[in-house]
Amino acid sequence: MNSVSKEEKNKGSFGKEAKSWILSIVSAVVVALLIRTFIVELYVVDGPSMQPTLQDGERLVVNKFIYHWRDPLKGEIVIFRYPRDHSRDFIKRVIAVGGDTIEIKDGHVYVNDALVNEDYIAEKTRTEYPKATVPEGTLFVCGDNRRNSLDSRFPDVGFVPLELVKGKAALIFWPIDNIASLP
């Protein structure tokens, strides 16, 4: 008569339970990677270029999904790969989009010959930028802290190709007392 001992039953049960746990963990990791790759990612603000809007060390939720459906809009804060070194990410505000004219003179920014109300900057822009048309498929971006920002005003960044844009900064979630949604 074939009988199964209690130990053999437990081994079989343990094997099924372990297999179930492994499958659950692998599934969770795959879902997390898909979410991080295509939907949202967490970022840490590094440096003062977006002050006073964003502070060094703040943590952000970045919406990576939105730009699969539409292009960035003026005023949005975007994360993009630095054109000279794709391993580095920059965070800046969209000032103008493809087809717009941009000019910075006398401390003021003009898009399509209209003065831009920049209530989010602490100090006027000191640098000048000659009138230029933003090429289609690119963005003109600036940091909110114009005195301490490497952005489209400088040749190292220039007009940012849309394919380098990773996502839209959507929410400050840390420190907890600074929780806020972003434009």
Image: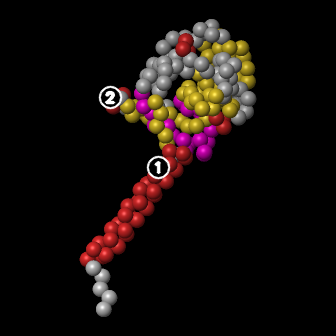
- Specify the quadrant of the image occupied by residue 95: top right
Q: Is residue 86 left or right of 61 when viewed as pictured?
A: right
SS for dot 2: helix
Q: Magenta region: which residues?
A: 58-81
Amino acid under disc 2: Asp
Residue placed at 62% from the left, 38% from the top?
Answer: 71
Residue placed at 57% from the left, 30% from the top?
Answer: 89
Number of the label disc, if any, that sits on residue 177: 2
Q: Is residue 43 visible?
A: yes
Residue indicated by mark 1: 32
- The vertical placement of 167 against 148, above or below, is below
- The vertical placement of 167 against 10, above or below, is above
Amino acid under disc 1: Ala
Marked residue nearer the N-terminal end (1 or 2): 1
Closer to us: 65 or 8: 8
Residue farthest to the bottom? 1
Closer to us: 183 or 80: 80
Residue placed at 27% from the left, 79% from the top?
Answer: 5
Quadrant for the N terminus, please.
bottom left
Is residue 69 one of those drawn in magenta? yes
SS for dot 1: helix
